[in-house]
Image (spheres, helix red, strand yellow):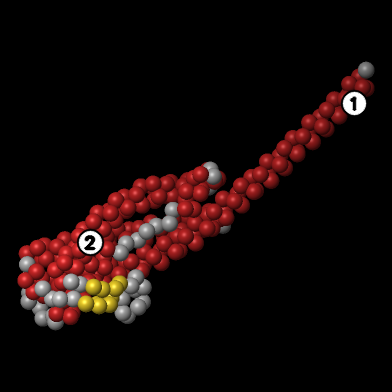
Amino acid sequence: MKKYYLKYTFEFVVIFLGILISLYFEQSRQDRVERERKNNSIEQLIKIIDQDLLQIDNFILLQQFSLESSNKLYDNLRYNEKLSEDKIIYHISSVGRALKSFFPQEGIFNQLISSDLIKRIESETLKSRLFKLFNEDLKRHDVHTKEYDEFFLSFNYKLSVNFFLEHNWKTDASDVNQIEILKYRFNNSFYNSDEFFGNLIEARKNISAYLTELQELKTKYSDLKSLCIDEVN
């Protein structure tokens, strides 16, 4: 009996260990597959971050261009700096172009959340930064963008009404002909009015605030990219 007992015990242990080993290798395989999926998503996120950083850099240049134009108009009105009507209209159009704003891409982050792959991220700092950027910073940016857009839509409508201004804008900061004036009728009384000057002051304030926000977003995106690279490496 003892002989059979030892035999069956040994067979049971062998079978049990075989099952444990099989489960271990299957779990390891599943972990490897999930880790690869997570890394692929992070690598896609890095590409999106690069695209967004290029977009942010481009809009920083455009907003700086608009701020320079608003400063030239401010100096012209406040200190009677000499500008031709053509130059005034060009700079007015440039200020109006500050309406153009940065739109982040959130698809990969939403994919990480919906697929639970974000739980596979090892860096707690990366996870917290991802949630903060996409659930707080970009939502706050969206609110601010809507506020800026509301002002600049009204500002540009007034330009159309008072100057009959027709113009084309380009968003490529490397293009030397970023602004094309098609037609206008100069309205000296409106240009020198308190209403226009007040709008110009508000435009300068909004552009400066948006530039600060873009610079902060650029820093956060750059930090996030570094964390993503560390995660996949």
**In the drawing, what numbered circle is on residue 116?**
none
Amino acid carrying label 1: it is Lys
Task: Name the residue located 32 percent from the left edge and 80 percent from the top edge.
Answer: 176
Q: Residue at x 83, y 28 (%)?
A: 12
- Count residues near mark 2 (Cα–Cα under 10 Å), then give few for <14, some for 14-19, many for 20+: many
| Residue 194 visible here | yes
Three-letter code, disc 2:
Phe
Q: Which of marks 2 and 1 is nearer the N terminus?
A: 1
Report the front residue among 185 and 77: 185
Name the image quarter holding the C terminus: bottom right
Marks 2 & 1, CB-CB < 8 Å contact: no
Picture disc at residue 152: 2
Can you tell which quarter of the image residue 167 is in? bottom left
Residue 208 visible (yes or no)? no
Residue drawn at (82%, 32%) of the image: 15
Look at the numbered disc 2 and give the secondary structure of its residue: helix
- Look at the picture and state if 78 lies above or below 4: below
Q: Residue 7 carries which label?
A: 1
- Count residues near mark 1 (Cα–Cα under 10 Å), then give few for <14, some for 14-19, many for 20+: few
Residue 22, quarter of the rendered image:
top right
Residue nearest the viewer, comparing 131 with 9: 131
Q: Position of residue 213 (x, y in %)?
A: 29, 58
Q: Position of residue 54 (x, y in %)?
A: 41, 67
